[in-house]
Image (cartoon, rainbow, N blue to C red):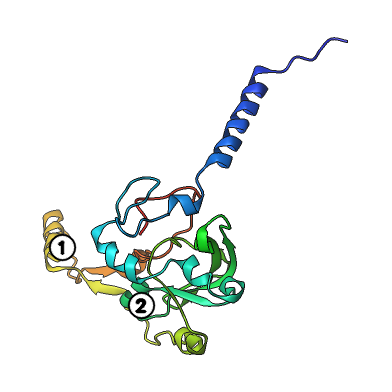
Amino acid sequence: MARKKVRPRLIAEIARRVRALREHRDRPRDSQRFALDYETLTRPLTGRRLPLRAWADVRRENRLLQLLGRLPLFGIGRLVTRKSWLWQHDEPCYWRLTRVRPDYTAQNLDHGKAWGILTFKGQTESEPREIEQVMHHDWRLVPKHEETAFTAFTPPSKAPPLYVPYPPLLRAMILANRQKNGDSNTEEPMLNLDRLRYSPWDYPARQKSKDKVKGTPV
């Protein structure tokens, strides 16, 4: 019986998958990627130094897994927030933890991943997802006896305006354009805010790639 020939494309696909598996196996763990020398404030793996504005937080604040490692069941069901959210928003912003996967190769179990349900500026998402920036040094644990008061939020009853006047320069440009085109419209130009829907700059975006890291985490 003749031996069946293996197609070259199939061999190339198998080789690609083997390389991907080896890269996945040999990739550095989070405890190696985000390890920090607190004397020099540099990452030993990359040799990068943290930005100057992060030095104070690194010495005073904790990473998320540093907080959760001190709690029973790694704090599942508890509320965590960030110092930057407390300073910038009056509405409640927090994560309710649903799952924690620590890196058991890390010393003190202070690295890993966590999942939860996000509430940002009083708006709660419906599905849990992975928490971003767990390695940053600005996480706070909400005490249990303060959770009710922390999560209390009454949305404003007054609806925001849908139209506002244009800034003076833009208003003058619109009126000049009308006059140039022979438009006899005398209505005051107004800016429609309903079209300008965007998320706040610090809203935690959904991760498109789990292995994608932007910049040097603090």
Give left or right: position of 183 versus 208. Answer: left
So how many labels did they put on this image?
2
The disc label shown at residue 170, or none: 1
Position of residue 77 relative to residue 115, above or below, is below
The disc label shown at residue 156, or none: none
- In this view of the protein, which residue sits in the foreground, 105 or 97? 105
- The image quarter containing residue 51 is bottom left
Q: Position of residue 188 (x, y in %)?
A: 19, 71
Identified at 13% across, 60% down, the residue is: 173
Q: Is residue 130 visible?
A: no
Per the model, the C-alpha gap separating discs 2 and 1 is: 35 Å
Q: Position of residue 151 (x, y in %)?
A: 48, 84
Q: Which residue is mark 2?
A: 86
Q: Amino acid at mark 2?
A: Leu
How many other residues sit within 10 Å of disc 1, few (<14), some (14-19) or many (≥20)? few
In the rendered view of the protein, which quadrant contains the C terminus? bottom left
Identified at 45% across, 85% down, the residue is: 150
Q: Position of residue 79 (x, y in %)?
A: 51, 77
Q: Amino acid at mark 1?
A: Leu
Identified at 43% across, 60% down, the residue is: 135
| Label located before the other in sequence (2 or 1) | 2
